[in-house]
Image (cartoon, rainbow, N blue to C red):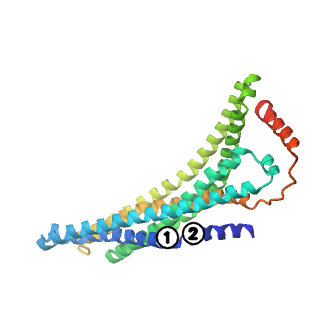
């Protein structure tokens, strides 16, 4: 199937940059591990320094915290740099391939497609693919790795409370997945309207002399306002659907934290856990918030990129023999009719 071939091609682009991806993934794992290490250091800091007054730990733990933070910074820089290099490289290859393919298509293709639509394929759609490649890999490797490491810390500290995460996360999955499918449909419609607006701008700017000659400025302004309003309405729908993921995550996070404080606090009062153990657990739980929130929005971002990827491949898979190209005289006459009709009368 064509749809399968498209995604195999995308994986082929990623595979060609696998060395940089491996380095980026190592940096992500370093970031994930050091994030969990910072959460774990809270326990000895409280129990050994603030409660028992251990002077040796007073010197050791700050040095360890600085070393862990430095390693975390190196990991974050490495993952950002190498992932950006991969994403930008994929965009360049796609952009070059797309323009090369367009250049090989017959003139009839350019008469059937609006200029602004073709321009949006190379600029807007390809840029969406770059964002998805960069963000999706970061979330899938770094954020999932961070969550796994932090979960390991929570299970090591207080395993009963760690089970709460496995109850909350599956509940949030279904509505987030449903919203992601809706985002893909709305994003595709937005991309079409952006292309239509680019085409309109090209036509009106190119035929500006004709517009002024016939005194049609107000008419063209009204047309532009209508297209702009349609794009605005569609973008607001997209914003609403994507913004719904945050309240879901916020509500479930608040529920989880409330349960942790209630149960964990009661266990500390009873002497089951030390204050340092509970605070280390809480630090790990709070650090889970950011990667969990990014992962909750990942599905919507992927759907946006897949919609853009489909639109790009509509051009790449276009047959070269669409229709026999007309002669030069016919092309000139058709160009004249298109400009006059699109710019003035419609």
Q: Name the residue tied to disc 1.
A: 21
Q: Residue at x 21, y 68 (%)?
A: 63
Question: Where residue 205 sits: x, y (%)?
Answer: 68, 34
29 to the left or right of 244: left
Q: Residue at x 49, y 61 (%)?
A: 84
Q: Crowding at label 2, few (<14), some or many (≥20) Cα neighbours within 10 Å? A: some
The answer to whether any part of residue 264 appears in the image is no
Question: Which quadrant of the rendered structure holds the C terminus?
Answer: top right
Label 2 sits on a secondary structure element that is helix
Question: Where residue 326 sits: x, y (%)?
Answer: 87, 48
The answer to whether any part of residue 72 appears in the image is yes
Q: Do the CB atoms of the residues marked 2 and 1 lie less than 8 Å apart?
A: yes
Question: Where residue 318 sits: x, y (%)?
Answer: 77, 59
Relative to 222, does residue 306 appear above or below in the rendering?
A: below
187 to the left or right of 332: left
Question: Which quadrant of the rendered structure holds the N terminus?
Answer: bottom right
Q: Name the residue tied to disc 2.
A: 14
Relative to 237, does residue 253 appear above or below in the rendering?
A: below
Looking at the image, which residue sits at the far front? 328
Residue 338, disc: none
């Amino acid at each position: 199937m064509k749809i399968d071939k498209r995604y195999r091609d995308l994986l082929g682009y990623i595979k060609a940059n696998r060395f940089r991806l491996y380095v980026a993934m190592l940096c992500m794992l370093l970031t994930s591990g050091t994030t969990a290490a910072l959460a774990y250091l809270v326990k000895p800091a409280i129990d050994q320094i603030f409660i028992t007054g251990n002077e040796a730990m007073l010197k050791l733990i700050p040095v360890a915290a600085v070393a862990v933070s430095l390693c975390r910074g190196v990991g974050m820089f490495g993952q950002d740099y190498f992932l950006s290099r991969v994403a930008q490289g994929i965009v360049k290859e796609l952009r070059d391939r797309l323009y090369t393919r367009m250049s090989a298509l017959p003139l009839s293709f350019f008469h059937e497609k609006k200029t602004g639509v073709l321009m949006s394929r190379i600029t807007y759609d390809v840029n969406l693919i770059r964002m998805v490649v960069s963000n999706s890999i970061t979330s899938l490797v770094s954020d999932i790795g961070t969550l796994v490491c932090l979960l390991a810390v929570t299970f090591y500290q207080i395993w009963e409370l760690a089970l709460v995460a496995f109850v909350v996360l599956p509940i949030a999955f279904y509505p987030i997945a449903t919203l992601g499918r809706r985002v893909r449909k709305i994003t595709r419609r937005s991309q079409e309207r952006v292309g239509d607006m680019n085409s309109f701008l090209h036509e009106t700017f190119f035929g500006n002399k004709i517009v002024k000659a016939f005194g049609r400025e107000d008419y063209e302004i009204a047309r532009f306002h209508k297209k702009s309003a349609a794009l605005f309405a569609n973008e607001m729908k997209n914003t609403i659907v994507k913004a719904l993921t945050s309240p879901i995550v916020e509500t479930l996070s608040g529920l989880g934290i409330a349960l942790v404080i209630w149960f964990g606090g009661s266990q500390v009062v009873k002497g089951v856990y030390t204050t340092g153990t509970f605070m280390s657990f809480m630090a790990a739980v709070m650090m889970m918030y950011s990667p969990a929130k990014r992962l909750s929005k990942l599905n919507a971002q992927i759907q946006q990129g897949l919609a853009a990827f489909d639109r790009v491949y509509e051009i790449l898979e276009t047959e070269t023999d669409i229709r026999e190209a007309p002669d030069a005289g016919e092309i000139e006459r058709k160009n004249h009719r298109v400009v006059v009709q699109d710019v003035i009368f419609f």
